[in-house]
Image (cartoon, rainbow, N blue to C red):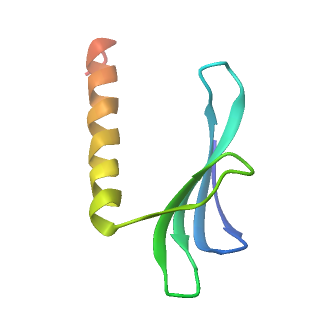
């Protein structure tokens, strides 16, 4: 499940529920942070986790890596 929402300190936020290796549900937030020095791409894991600013390059690399990981998982499961 995912939800695009507004959150304090964020211009846009996509909130999804992840699951820890221990099986606990945990929110993951990605979007556009709104710090005093201008909009920044960011991510946060957990309700009380720190928001982390990502450069455009690192954000792009993260997206590519996640797509490759999903493709590898689907291939290993025989779904690709």
Q: Image quadrant for the C terminus?
A: top left
Q: Is residue 27 above or below residue 40?
A: above
Frontmost residue, 45 versus 79: 45
Residue lying at the far bottom in this picture: please name it.
Answer: 37
Give the percent coordinates (x, y) of residue 56: 32, 68
Left or right: residue 28 compared with residue 60: right
Q: Image quadrant for the N terminus?
A: top right
> Based on the displayed image, in which of its 4 quarters is residue 74 positioned?
top left
The residue lying at 59 percent from left, 21 percent from top is 21
Residue 78 seen:
no
Frontmost residue, 50 versus 63: 50
Give the percent coordinates (x, y) of residue 50: 63, 56
The residue lying at 31 percent from left, 18 percent from top is 79
Residue 72 seen:
yes
Give the percent coordinates (x, y) of residue 35: 58, 80
The residue lying at 71 percent from left, 32 percent from top is 25
Left or right: residue 63 compared with residue 41: left
């Amino acid at each position: 499940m995912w939800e695009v929402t507004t959150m304090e300190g964020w211009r846009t936020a996509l909130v999804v529920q992840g699951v820890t290796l221990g099986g606990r549900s945990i929110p993951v937030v990605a979007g556009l942070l709104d710090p005093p020095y201008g909009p920044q791409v960011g991510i946060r894991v957990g309700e009380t986790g720190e928001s982390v600013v990502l450069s455009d390059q690192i954000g792009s690399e993260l997206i590519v890596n996640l797509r490759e990981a999903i493709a590898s998982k689907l291939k290993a499961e025989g779904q690709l």
